[in-house]
Amino acid sequence: MPGTPMPTVLVTGTSSDAHTWNLVYLQLLLEEWGHEVTNLGPCAPDDLVTGSAVELRPDLIVVSSVNGHGHQDGLRLVRVLRARPELAGTTIVIGGKLGTDGLRNVGQVRRLLAAGYDRVFDDGDVNAFRDMLARPPVRAVS
């Protein structure tokens, strides 16, 4: 619809993850699906992600990890993001290789959700990610 603003997305890697192609892929996919994307790139420090999120006020923050430390870095990052009142209603998701054992770790997923992520995509399910974009979760703001 002309004049309708595109949903905005902030895409970032975690502070310890130097991988880039996952972030480029996500950016291209999101743009293809009609989103305006700001990509912070790999090894983004928590303060850069937080400052950018507060400044840009995106509809969605996507955190991606390939190095297997996503659960550790992701827990720290989401706690920092959720501590900012301006981001209380922002949808935040994480995905990729979140652990180093190569197994889906239900405990890690639960901890990430309890810490503040709206969704965790640790299985590479692009269809589930696209479905989430069509029906973004609503976060209760207290």
Image: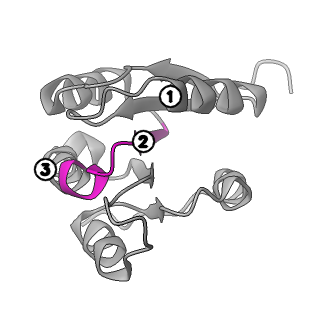
User: As shown in the figure, which amino acid type bears the numbered disc 2?
Assistant: Ser
How many labels, in total? Answer: 3
Residue type (three-letter) at the residue carrying disc 1 = Leu
Judge from the rendering whether residue 4 lies leftward or rightward of residue 25; answer left or right.
right
Q: Position of residue 117 (x, y in %)?
A: 35, 60
Residue 118 magenta-drawn? no
Asked if the residue at tag 1 contacts the one at tag 2, i.e. Cβ–Cβ closer than 8 Å, the answer is yes
| Residue 71 included in the magenta stretch of the image | yes
Q: Which of these two is toward me, 110 or 17? A: 17
Compared with 29, 105 (above or below) is below
Say which element carries label 3.
Answer: loop
Mark 3 and mark 1 lie on one chain; the one further toward the N terminus is: 1
> Position of 77 compared to 70: left or right?
left
Q: Secondary structure at mark 2?
A: strand
- Which sits earlier in the primary sequence, circle 2 or circle 1? 1
Query: Which residue lies under the disc numbered 1?
Result: 23
Q: Residue beneath label 3, please? A: 83
The residue to which callout 2 is attached is 64
Contact (Cβ within 8 Å) of mark 3 with mark 2: no
